[in-house]
Image: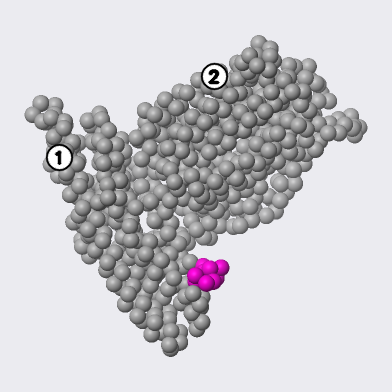
Amino acid sequence: MVAFGKKLKESQIQEWQGYYINYKLLKKKVNRYTQEIHVGSENRLHVLKDFARMLDAQIETIVLFLLEQQGALASRLSQLGELHDALSQHQDGARISELQEAYRAVGRDLLRLLFFVEINATGLRKILKKFDKRFGYRFTDYYVKTRANHPYSQLRQVFKHVGIGAVVGAISRNLAELQYHQGSYISIYDQPTLSHPDPVVDSIKAAVNRLSHSTTFLEFLGKHAFIMQEELPSLSEDHDVEQRYHFMSLLLNLVNTFLYMVNTYIIVPTADNYSLNLGAAATVCGVIIGSMAVAQVFSSVYFSAWSNRSYLKPLVFSSIVLLIGNTLYALAYDLNSIAVLLIGRLFCGLGSARAVNRRYISDCVPLKLRMQASAGFVSASALGMACGPALACLFQTNFKIYKLTFNEDTLPGWVMAISWFVYSLWLWISFREPLQEPKENLVPQEANAGLLINCAVENGSTRPLLLNCEAKQPDGNEDQEPDDDEEEDSEKIQRPVTSLVSAYRLLTPSVKVQLFVYFMLKYAMEILLAESSVITEYYFIWSTSSVAIFLACLGLTVLPVNIIVGNYISNIFEERQVLLASEIVVCIGILLSFHILTPYSVPQYVGSALITFVAAEVLEGVNLSLLSRVMSSRLSQGTYNGGLLSTEAGTLARVIADGTITLSGYLGESKLLNVTLVPSLFICISSIVATCFTYNSFY
């Protein structure tokens, strides 16, 4: 089945044309207001009221048309319900199939109506953003606040889709009964486990959730992977993606993610002891841990580029490099060389294939499974983060085989080297390289979705839903003006960016702030985790096992916290509210971590660490969820994509944090805690201030 947008008929386009928000007219009006205020012939208060009145009128037209279409759908469902009742008396397989298709047709028309709402909602957001940019004050904030909560608000109808749920329920119930209970007609309310929604119903529910910003734990967790989804789901999967999908290959990608995170955190409890045994200071653990992140800054780029051509080759290369890196890390003890140790960790960083893992999910997993695969990617990362330190506490032994030493310092390297060897064999035997798409077909679905919306609001009609919208023709002086940043040229939208500089230029101020917030939370978490072994040994004389158990318990909080946020908090509060609140809690956690005057106690350290870590985890999920929605569609494909930018921001934060620990070590272990927390606190406060300044842009 072809994509939904390509199935719209020209008659339907013309029929609905007059009910779309007139973006061109509003844009001209904004330009005229600008000129009038500039020459002093108009005052700002009158402009604000006049523009609000125009928007009210257009939104009312949209809402009345929406209600009219919902009524038509309800009428069709009522007629189908009568046929359904008649069929319950006479079992006719052919008639049941016809009735099922009739219900699906209503579902497709409802999805078409949701596209109508999406285009208008996007056009409204864009014109409000343009107005704010031209006049320098927050008309958006005023307009949304005054309209959203009013009992007779038309705006709420656009964004909350009142009444659509009833239509979805009727379609879902009847399709389920017809498909799974032919002859018995058992109610789905009595047998919920037997209900498997029709693909049309799945598409509608996903579209409604996206438009109303409703979320579930699976969706919330999936967005952590920062794999940008389509603007709205189509009715069926692309046939080429179905052919490229291979479950074992996906599983191997997730195992790669898990093993890499184990590899990252398995050395944290013993890094300080290893550096002491090699004749270096305990705080050199910052360099040992951070050297992997330094290499990852570069490996993320070349692995992202390599994944344009192949998936198997970079994964094999990654496994070999990690095998070498871990072997060098383990051999450094017997060679008594800190240089070999650092080279081994650099090799481990050069083997980071997380860009390939993300890319495989984005390109080779069907849309109906992509959210589950994204959630699997995040879960594998979280599990690896917890298992790494937990494994380290099992290596409390010391023996030799020939001249090779096996103890708590070297066993993490040997165990991971063996793990990567076994993984590489499994990879070579079981991984299936997906068929490469022709170059002309490399335009991403996400880019098409972005093109659909942008062209729609520019042309003021449904014509862009065909995804091959006509080139814009000059229509007066107003239309020949260069558009704002957010109004990208349709050809540019389809082309992936070709450099980090080009990618950076596509970032709006709010997106830059969100990347800075991501930098902040990764910095705070790295300071907490990387120096934990040194701090706990100095203040509490903890053993390696105690540190490992503490870090493992921190890692195990990731999934439960995300269940709470994904299922409850994100459905009660706006994501920008959760974002700001989480930043403040991270700041509180950092403040509680300082050692001032009173003796430093275990409850203070553990409590402050738990507050900081949990708040940072909540912040990461909400921040990436917002980023996935507002990042430019051009950054969903190619080497320099949104996932690479977020990875680079987080990796750079880890590098700087680990460097801070090592440099602070020269002042002595007694001052390490407070000295490393000062920059963390400063960066956190800066991110809160930046978030407050751009708060209204997270919309």
Q: Can residue 252 be seen here?
A: yes
Residue at x 49% of width, y 29% of height: 584
User: Could you tell me which residue is drawn at 55 percent across and 34 percent down?
Assistant: 616
Say what secondary structure mark 1 lies in. helix
Residue 269 location, quadrant: top right
The magenta-colored residue range is 188-196
The picture places residue 322, in percent across and down from the top left corner, at: 69, 37
Q: Which mark is residue 679?
A: 2
Where residue 290 appears, x then y in whole percent?
64, 26
Q: Report if residue 309 is visible in the image.
A: no
Rendered residue at 38%/37% (across/down) = 698
Residue in front for this viewpoint, 78 or 126: 78
Position in image of residue 86 (x %, y %): 38, 85
Q: Earlier in the sequence, mark 1 or mark 2?
A: 1
Kindly state the secondary structure of the residue where label 2 is placed: helix
Quadrant for the N terminus in the image: bottom left
* Rendered position, 22 above or below 677: below
634 vs 344, left or right, is left
Between residues 111 and 205, which one lies in front from this camera angle? 205
Q: CA distance from mark 1 to mark 2?
A: 48 Å
Name the foreground residue: 270 vs 334. 270
Q: Amino acid at mark 2?
A: Pro
What is the quadrant of residue 561 in the picture?
top right
Residue holding disc 1: 50
Q: Choose between 331 and 530: the one closer to the eye.
A: 530
Q: Residues within 10 Å of mark 2 (few under 14, many from 20)?
A: some
Q: Residues within 10 Å of mark 1 (few under 14, many from 20)?
A: few
Amino acid type shown at disc 1: Asp
